[in-house]
Image (cartoon, helix red, strand yellow):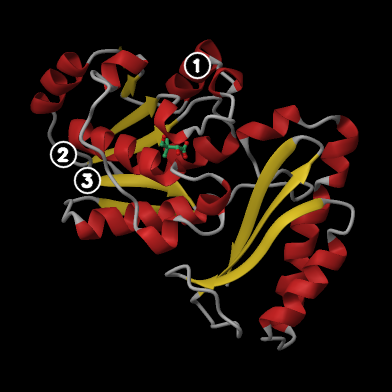
Amino acid sequence: MKIINTIEELQTIRKELSGTIGFVPTMGALHEGHISLIKNAREDNDIVIVSIFVNPTQFSVNEDLDKYPRRDAADKKICELCKVDYLFMPEINTMYKCDDEVLIKAPKISSFILEGEKRPGHYDGVLQVVLKLFNLVQPSNAYFGKKDAQQLSLISQMVKNLFLPINIVECEIIREQDGLAMSSRNVYLTQEERKEALAISKSLNVTIVSITKGQRDSKTIKDKMYEVMSNLDVEYVAIVNRDFEEIQTIEAKNTIILIACKVGTTRLIDNIWV
Ligand code: PAF
């Protein structure tokens, strides 16, 4: 595996590459969720490129960029074991060379609801960095997890709207054995909070069972989910279609049920695609 730190080196290497390129952009602190994205990329492509970059423009002023977990040595080892060909690890001033840059604006409606409402400007920053990375890597396929469902939807929309010749591959949520969705933030949970957090996946499981039994009413489903998560500080439960429009009735193969909540001081998100 070759580690690349500069734009010049990445562009020089990219010119020489042929075959399909699978790209997995990350912010590091890699866990099983990322590993499954990398494995999918490895299976589908001739070359696999992973990036690790904690992107400052997607953090708002009250979110602590410096507190974001960084585990460069462990991440490099994981990428090596997953047979990644190139690991791109730029510094902030490599990706952002001046203060007054051309900016990307995420769509007004779908980026200012749910995660976007709680984190204004977050998706502008995500799209800005993902577009920069796409332009540098020029992947055939780019891999994103369904856990960040709104991010995945907005990146897919950017690819469509800007006519980028990239296939976005949606990858399944990876869970711990007890159901907790894998997240870099899980490390912040105390043992007690870790147990409490299981109410999140439990509420999604209860929902799957009730939909299987024929329940279609969004309000009834939401009420039950709040009840199952009564021990948690739930920010929202939302039932939307794939365009992130709120729906009153579950639509088969076109519904995402999302949760954001705080467990202690840690904010967690999870969802299911129906
Ligand atoms: O999902 C993430 O880790 C980040 O939002 C991404 C897509 C790597 C952009 O910084």
Question: Can see residue 161?
Answer: yes
Residue drawn at 82 percent across, 73 percent down = 224
Q: Relative to residue 189, is residue 273 depicted above or below?
A: below
Q: Which mark is residue 77?
A: 1
Question: Can see residue 46?
Answer: no
Image-quadrant location for residue 185? top right
Q: Is mark 1 within 8 Å of ligand 1?
A: no
Residue with the mark numbered 2: 19
Cα distance in 3D space between marks 3 and 1: 25 Å
Residue at disc 2, secondary structure? loop
Residue 166 is situated, as x and y percent measured from the top left of the image, at 22, 50
Cα distance in 3D space between marks 3 and 2: 9 Å
- Left or right, residue 223 beside residue 100: right
Q: Nearer the viewer, mark 3 or mark 2?
A: 3
View quadrant of ligand 1: top left
Residue 225 is situated, as x and y percent measured from the top left of the image, at 78, 67
Q: Are marks 3 and 2 in contact (CB under 8 Å)?
A: no
Residue with the mark numbered 3: 140
Q: Relative to residue 210, is residue 269 depicted above or below?
A: above
Image-quadrant location for residue 219? bottom right
Question: Can you say which quadrant of the picture contains the N terminus?
Answer: top left
| Amino acid type, label 3 | Ser
Q: Relative to residue 112, is residue 245 depicted above or below?
A: below
Residue drawn at 25 percent across, 54 percent down = 159
| Amino acid type, label 1 | Lys
